[in-house]
């Protein structure tokens, strides 16, 4: 659609601008101010310069949390994306079962995040939870409260349970947009199942898959509530991700300066990722538009 | 797309109505006739079972007594009881949590959609100075980790004397819901041809009359989907809601965490409270099942 | 309305004023020569002036962080590096 150039459109955007600026810009400025000062309460602040940043960037605690977060995101993507594609490909295409599948699959997405945590906290317990109890019965030594590996497995399985449906839904939306004529043509050409996937389904899913990967990466990078409820960051610090560490520092220990510095570094990383996300998405969209006009 | 291109264009050019003859449809018909079970269907079934098992366990627990939960391992309630639900519906500190959650979620939904409507119209119809950067800036707020904002939010809303009020949580959730609503609505509005606007102006409609009488009915489903997503993200969020409330506006999810840490033993009530938080989403989802992918893709599917 | 909790300091105020001045300058520049002079640079996709400013600012933030994390020298030197970087971005991206 050809859009008209009209700067008066700013008036339509103004309410959004004011509302979001109130909730975003003022807090962000405050964080910047805190990050260069030290406080002991009572609104008394002392200039600290860039000390908090230097301290943060050199601290093992921050490095560990960052690495844990990156490893977690990588594992999540490696499991959820292939699994999501697989389920989307196997889903029925027509009839009442489509609706049933969609509704049941979307269910975990609508559960409050701390309830998701609670569900898995209970589910994994060896005394009262189905998963933990079954593991015990099978003779597997499973205890997410004490064993770091078990804690990680629990958090990862929980996230797969919670968010794989997002990948499924997006891929499915891409798949149903493929006209039947494509499959028919592939059949005339005698294309194998793999060729159909590689040359018809994957290209059509490309854009939504990109959105799914980027969304899953960002959301898993910001994860807080679910692991906090299940493991509280433990055992030890083994599941302390960036967000959990940040809240511990800011609310638990009231170290405003270091917490603000960490917020800013965290925010800059997210800002960089968002920019990559946006640029890639915009350009993918433009390329597709160009290709479609060419056809 | 090298392999099927020629045949694709041929089939498209011949104008064969695809659905009736396609491989998928043929297979589906064959399996229906013979009543045979396709192994492919196992994948979604197993996946859905995996999704439902933990939820079943929660529902199961919510109908058990605490004695049964802790002392006996049963796959379904031996003595089904409604006591856990009775506790929640008779204790104000429990059911007020639900009322608080619903109040701020609805407030947030109304505010988000109301301010997002004109903005989405501007983005879908006009180009203006800095429009792309503004759009990107909104995106960054959707992507910002709530943990970063928790602390300054507390200070900000204290300064305005809004701590422990519903409007504070509603406004704070606007941070990520307004951008979301703008995107979803922009997606739906771009699907409405611009000629409709122009015809209406030629017919002498003023802008507000056109917007409410002609345009709104055309994007009604979009408004519904945007409202649903605002409802959903406000409903599932805990960190900010918990930070901004003390007692009077405390959401149900925060009350649940308190119970976990303090008494820690009343599993039945905890499970019942959890089940009750799942129900609103489970009901509404049926109506938006075909749009949910569009919502998650920020209106860009 | 009490805003002392925002804990303003002169350096941070100057920092935000500089950012806002840059954005305002972009608006004026756009008014003087509209279109944003889009072009495809070393990043292989189309960028406008605004995009280039954003890339400069974000890159500068990471340069300063790297400077703080890796060297003992004063941050003023990093500022110089940032300016050179911004110049390169506006020239080649």
Image: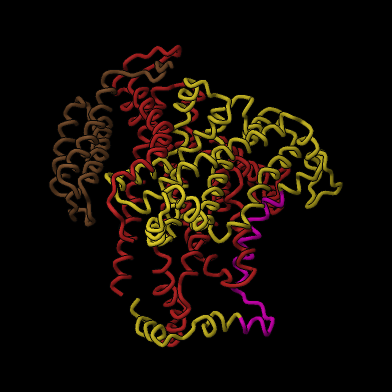
Chain colours: A red, B yellow, C brown
**Lateral position of residue B136 relative to residue A194, left or right:** left
Q: Residue B77 appears at what percent x and percent y?
A: 82, 49
Q: Is residue A106 magenta?
A: no
**Lateral position of residue B190 relative to residue A116, left or right:** left
**Lateral position of residue C20 relative to residue A83, left or right:** left
Furthest-right residue in this view: B79
Furthest-front residue in this view: B204
Q: Which quarter of the rendered picture does the N terminus of chain A lie within?
A: bottom left
**Quick check: can you spot residue A80?**
no
**Quick check: can you spot residue C13?**
yes
Q: Which residues are magenta?
A: B29-57
Q: Residue A53 appears at what percent x and percent y?
A: 32, 27
Quadrant in which residue B255 is drawn: top right
Q: Nearer the viewer, residue A243 or A19?
A: A19
Q: Nearer the viewer, residue A95 or A262?
A: A95
Q: Residue B195 appears at what percent x and percent y?
A: 38, 62
Quadrant in which residue C56 is drawn: top left
Residue at 51 percent of width and 24 percent of height: A252
Which secondary structure is most common in the magenta stretch?
A: helix
**Lateral position of residue A74 relative to residue A106, left or right:** left
Q: Which quarter of the rendered picture does the C terminus of chain A lie within?
A: bottom left
Residue at 46 percent of width and 69 percent of height: A177
Q: Residue A226 appears at what percent x and percent y?
A: 56, 41
Q: Is residue B42 magenta?
A: yes
Residue at 35 percent of width and 24 percent of height: A35
């Amino acid at each position: 659609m050809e859009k008209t150039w009209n700067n008066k459109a700013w008036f339509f955007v103004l309410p959004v601008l004011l509302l979001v600026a109130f909730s975003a810009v003022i807090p962000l400025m405050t964080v910047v101010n805190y990050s260069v000062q030290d406080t002991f309460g009572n609104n008394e602040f002392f200039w600290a310069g860039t000390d908090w940043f230097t301290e943060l960037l050199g601290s093992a605690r921050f490095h560990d949390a960052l690495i844990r977060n990156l490893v977690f995101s990588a594992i999540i993507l490696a499991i959820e994306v292939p699994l999501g594609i697989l389920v989307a490909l196997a889903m029925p295409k027509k009839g009442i079962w489509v609706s049933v599948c969609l509704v049941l699959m979307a269910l975990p997405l609508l559960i409050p995040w701390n309830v998701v945590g609670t569900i898995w906290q209970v589910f994994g317990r060896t005394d009262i939870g189905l998963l933990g109890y079954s593991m015990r019965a099978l003779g597997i030594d499973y205890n997410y409260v004490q064993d770091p590996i078990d804690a990680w497995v629990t958090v990862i399985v929980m996230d797969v349970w919670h968010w794989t449906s997002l990948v499924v839904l997006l891929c499915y939306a891409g798949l149903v947009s493929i006209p039947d004529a494509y499959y028919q043509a592939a059949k005339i050409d005698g294309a194998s199942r793999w060729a159909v996937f590689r040359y018809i389904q994957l290209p059509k899913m490309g854009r939504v898959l990109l959105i799914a990967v980027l969304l899953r990466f960002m959301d898993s990078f910001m994860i807080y509530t679910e692991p906090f409820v299940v493991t509280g960051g433990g055992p030890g610090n083994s599941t302390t991700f960036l967000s959990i560490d940040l809240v511990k520092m800011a609310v638990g220990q009231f170290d405003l300066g270091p917490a603000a510095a960490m917020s800013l570094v965290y925010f800059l990383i997210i800002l960089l990722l968002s920019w990559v996300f946006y640029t890639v998405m915009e350009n993918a969209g433009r390329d597709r538009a160009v290709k479609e006009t060419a056809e | 797309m090298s392999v099927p291109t020629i045949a694709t264009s041929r089939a498209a050019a011949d104008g064969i109505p695809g659905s009736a003859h396609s491989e998928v449809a043929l297979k589906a018909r064959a399996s229906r006739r013979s009543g045979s079970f396709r192994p492919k269907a196992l994948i979604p079934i197993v996946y859905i079972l995996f999704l439902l098992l933990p939820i079943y366990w929660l529902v199961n627990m919510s109908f058990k007594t605490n004695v049964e939960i802790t002392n006996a391992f049963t796959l379904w309630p031996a003595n089904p009881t409604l006591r856990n639900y009775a506790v929640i519906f008779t204790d104000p500190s429990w059911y007020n949590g639900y009322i608080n959650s619903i109040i701020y979620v609805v407030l947030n939904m109304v505010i988000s959609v109301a301010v997002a409507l004109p903005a989405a119209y501007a983005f879908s119809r006009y180009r203006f100075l800095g429009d792309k950067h503004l759009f990107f800036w909104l995106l960054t707020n959707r992507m910002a980790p709530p943990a970063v904002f928790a602390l300054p939010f507390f200070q900000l809303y204290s300064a305005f004397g809004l701590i422990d009020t519903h409007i504070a949580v509603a406004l704070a959730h606007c941070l990520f819901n307004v951008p979301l609503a703008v995107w979803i609505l922009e997606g739906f509005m771009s699907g409405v041809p611009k000629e409709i606007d122009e015809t209406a102006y030629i017919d002498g409609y003023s802008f507000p009359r056109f917007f409410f009488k002609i345009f709104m009915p055309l994007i009604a489903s979009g408004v519904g989907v945007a409202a649903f997503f605002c409802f959903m993200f406000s409903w599932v969020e805990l960190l900010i809601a918990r930070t901004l409330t003390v007692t009077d506006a405390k959401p149900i999810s925060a009350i649940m965490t308190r119970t976990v840490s303090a008494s820690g033993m009343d599993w039945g009530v905890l499970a019942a409270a959890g089940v009750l938080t799942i129900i609103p989403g489970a009901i509404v989802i049926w109506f938006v099942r075909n749009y949910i992918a569009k919502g998650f893709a920020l209106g860009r599917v | 309305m009490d805003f002392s909790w925002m804990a303003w300091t002169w350096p941070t105020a100057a920092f935000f004023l500089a950012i806002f001045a840059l954005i305002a300058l972009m608006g004026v520049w756009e008014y003087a020569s509209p279109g944003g002079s889009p072009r495809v640079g070393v990043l292989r996709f189309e960028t406008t002036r605004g995009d280039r400013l954003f890339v400069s600012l974000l890159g500068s933030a990471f340069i300063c962080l790297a400077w703080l994390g890796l060297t003992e020298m004063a941050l003023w030197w990093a500022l110089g590096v940032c300016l050179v970087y911004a110049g390169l971005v506006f020239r080649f991206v």
